Amino acid sequence: MSFYSITEHSTISYQGCDSKADIQVNKKCYDWLKKLSKSEENSFAAIRLIKENVLKVTNYVGVLQSPDGTTIEILPKTTDKQLTEQQKKQLRQKLVELVCISQRSPLESHRANLEIIKNYPVHEWLMGEFLHLLEQMVSRGLRYDYERIEEESRYIRGRLRIDKQLQQGAARQHLFQISHEIFSPNRAENRLLKTAVDIVFKHTKAHWKLANKLKHLMDEIPTSIHPDKDFLSWQNNRLMKAYESIKPFCWLIIKQLNPTTQSGQLAGMSLLFPMEKLFEDYVGHCLQNTFAKDGLDLTRQSTQQYLCQHQEKPLFMLKPDFILANKFVLDAKWKQLDLSEAGEKQGTSKYNISQNDFYQMFAYGHKYLQGKGKLFLIYPCHEKFDINDSKHPLTFDFTPSTQNNDEKLMLYIVPCDWQRPVQSVFPDWFKQAILQSLPTTPEGGG
């Protein structure tokens, strides 16, 4: 079983093919990936065919494992150069942090389990985290509930089902149709946990012994036949407090590692996350951490404004990623800007910024800020866009020439060094630009 580690937007071909792809897998794995890329029923968008015998990874990160056991790890793209083993380990750990923040799961629990991903792909960390949490729950005791049982018995227990009993033939009059309740672990939450354990048992290499142990300890609990219905039935009350921390891991394993979500020749394993969503959630977490102590409220995915109206009905919702203190609009983009010397030489360089992103921010500025104020586009740092080179903001003026200069609509490009600790991902000038624009409260004011 082969293992490959690549980054976003890498190319894949098969062994023996005359191609300059980043990696070449065996033909069985390549055929499986190619069928996945064409599978409309699975809405698979992580891989696409770009030319004959060459596939390309899109902006998803995580792990793919073909039915023959070939594993492909996809890490965030931070450089055009080939990653060293140390860089891969650091990216795996950071990817785990992004996933935890996106899934709103505390990273502090079982932090020692992060050592696993130094030698194994990211999905081993996920499965290990789930198993360690489940082991604690099983040792303390799973939650039981009353389950109604309807059966045929020689003895009366519980309630006699009169309607069914009257339908009994003469030769079966000595048997009773009864209904009764038993105190059983067969409830939606436990069925989902058992299903997740079975999936982990099939796929883990680093935690097989623990998975096997838990699988046997939960042997009396059936697997979930309808996971979606059982997730809807998952209770979040006070009695189920112990189940809160394991729920996101259980959901990820069943939804993304479950081989039954694919069929026939497409059966395999995948744990993939859109990098745009992970980056957006991480930026939101960092903004909250940066401005919470200043008392600034952060609103995510606001839906208050529309682009226009038609027949007195609003059309085209404008949904910025963040609104800070009801005064600043911020959007996070997982795209690589180019502020290198080649770009600097061109006086009117667009720095690889999308024109559509500017149109979008222009609309936000006029609808949410009434055409005056500050907008911020947040991009990830990389070798051509370094936070250390951004002591002064890159700004763009949206103000019409006829408008008063005191009422400018300005757009700021903000670097986010997402590989740093949370408290230092933004440049110093960014926080100053926010706080200095806030109205000051007079002394003695309420």
Image (cartoon, grey):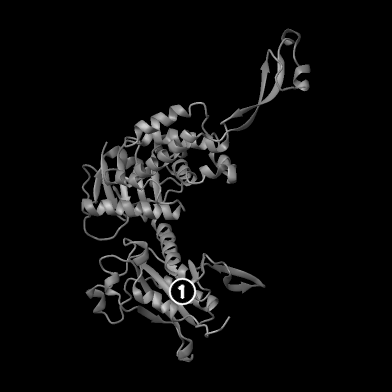
Horizontal side of residue 308 vs 138, given as left or right: right
Q: Amino acid at mark 1?
A: Met
Q: Quadrant of residue 157?
A: top right
Which residue is label 1 attached to? 361
Q: Secondary structure at mark 1?
A: helix
Residue drawn at (42%, 52%) of the image: 100
Q: Can residue 6 be seen by looking at this rendering?
A: yes
Q: Position of residue 173 (x, y in %)?
A: 74, 10
Residue drawn at (43%, 31%) of the image: 214
Which residue is at the front of the view, 31 or 122?
122
The answer to whether 238 is drawn above or below residue 340 in the figure is above
Label 1, residues with CA under 10 Å away: few <14, some 14-19, many ≥20: many
Which residue is at the front of the view, 194 or 341?
194
Which residue is at the front of the view, 103 or 15?
103
Q: Position of residue 99 (x, y in %)?
A: 40, 52
The answer to whether 86 is drawn above or below residue 348 in the figure is above
Q: Quadrant of residue 264?
A: top left
Q: Quadrant of the N terminus?
A: top left
